[in-house]
Image: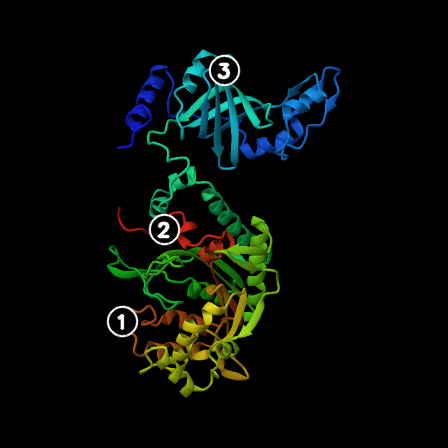
Amino acid sequence: MNQDSDGKDPREARREKLRKIEEMGIDPFGCRFDDRSFIADCRQRSETEIKWTRQDGEEVPLPDFADENLDYRQWKADNGPGAESGPTVRVAGRIMLSRDTGKLIFANIRDWTGDIQIFIGKKQVGEENFALAKLFDLGDLVGAEGRLGRTNTGELTVFAEKLFLHSKMLEPAPDKHAGLTNPDLRQRMRYADLAFNDGAMQAFLDRTKIVKSIRSTLDRDNFCEVEGPTLHVVPGGAAARPFATHHNALDMPLTMRIALELHLKRLMVGGMERVYELGRVYRNEGISPRHNPEFTMLECYQAYGDYGTMMDLTEQLIVDAIDAIGGGYIRQFDGKTIDFTPPFQRATYADLFQKATGIDASDEAAVIEHAKKLNLETEGKHPDVIRNEIFEEQVEDTLEGPIFVIDYPASICPLTKRKRDNPEIAERFELFVLGMELANAYTELNDPDLQQQLFETQLQGLEEEDSMAKMDHDFVRALRYGMPPAGGLGVGIDRLVMILADKKSIRDIILFPLLRPE
């Protein structure tokens, strides 16, 4: 059992304070709090609205408080006598630190924009408010109204005249030094992680900025955001195992979507020439630092474009996202440096394969022999499938990037248009950063007869539960109505955020990742 310094159960000690607050006639869970300022706004206002005025009426510019060696008390002595003035503000946040000296209490509170100190003096707030402050605990949500100014040490402070309790925390706060460090607990108790772990909130705020930036870039380029169905009769658009469900009223099996692609292409057939969706997809597969069963995907399609168009767009999306969160194009991830300065490197699949393995990618016998040396299964597999397994095994981890890997073997790209001068090659790229795939794009196949033929070839030998084991006949029918030539792009938002926010695990940038039952 956790106990406080007096030997009491901290939960019971907090509930005892809760009862005393109720006896004072104060609602311990607060109410509406109008005209509140965010703490970041207070810091910005402090630069222009806190003034030092000498007795002769002259205003003296305040010093730069970023200088840690500044002695504000000495500065005032050198520029006085005089008085400091500042605006009255109302702030609210969670108590992160508290120091009680008897008749004075200094509390640091935090909202989602930053931290600020609150000065609570018995003389300044009155007996009742001061008695309330004595019942505050770490983690309580409180408010204060008072003058914005600086202490003798120069620390920005709200000199409280009124106090408010917005919510009494009934659980003990994590240790201020050890904090909430267990990764499983941080993900399971995300509320506590965000509230008490320094830097936890910023990664998710950066995620929001990145997603907003992506939408802004696409909207600026005249793309239309749409919402496709998340329940599919036939899963398609990717090779993945779906989650199965059942619709009772229609008595029919359904699956959660594994990709966004085929419905967006239907919209292009209908005349929506630039479409995108930013949404959740679901794949009934393993969990790892790079995979979560539900994740966020961007897919977009541009009529009369190709995979080159999508390379330019991908580059712009990432550059704009970096600009949105700041920090520059030279970034750190897991101790390694990545240079996102455009343009990104481009190299062919075949050239990278040969560079990493020393084997000509077109030499089937050599490819199969090399696969056997790597203990890869080769029996009954198409040479291109074997070649791609070698690529995944030996090449991808060498790709520091950002690098566009272009021109994949056509047989492993059933939704992709072939090169005119070489039908064995598909106009496809994948964007890699430090061995991780961030984006995948095609020059989209719009020939309905060839699409049906490729689907039929792909279905051969697949197990029934495989997502690609059923043909989407309606999609083929849609193509027969005429889909314009187009470029299509998919971007894994979680992995992109993970890299730009320098987080080692995808779970650190998904607010509520899937976990085993507690």
N-terminal of the pair, mark 1 or mark 2, is: 1
The quadrant holding residue 313 is bottom right
Residue 497 lies, in percent from the top left, at 48, 54
N-terminal of the pair, mark 3 or mark 1, is: 3
Mark 1, other Cα within 10 Å: few <14 / some 14–19 / many ≥20: few
Mark 2 → mark 3, Cα distance in angstroms:
44 Å
As drawn, is 189 to the left or to the right of 402?
A: left
Marks 3 and 1 close (CB-CB < 8 Å): no
Say what secondary structure mark 3 lies in: helix
According to the image, label 3 marks what residue? Answer: 125
Say what secondary structure mark 2 lies in: loop
Residue 380, above or below 203:
below
Identify the residue at horizontal 37%, vertical 21% (top origin).
27
According to the image, label 1 marks what residue? Answer: 464
Identify the residue at horizontal 48%, vertical 84% (top origin).
360
According to the image, label 2 marks what residue? Answer: 513
Instruction: Please state which amino acid type lies under the numbered disc 2.
Output: Pro
Instruction: Please state which amino acid type lies under the numbered disc 3.
Output: Val
Q: Of residues 255 and 515, which is closer to you in this image? A: 515
Mark 3 → mark 1, Cα distance in angstroms:
72 Å
On-image quarter of the N terminus: top left
Give the numbered dot on residue 267: none
Mark 1 → mark 2, Cα distance in angstroms:
29 Å
Say what secondary structure mark 1 lies in: loop
Identify the residue at horizontal 45%, vertical 66% (top origin).
266
Residue 241 lies, in percent from the top left, at 32, 65
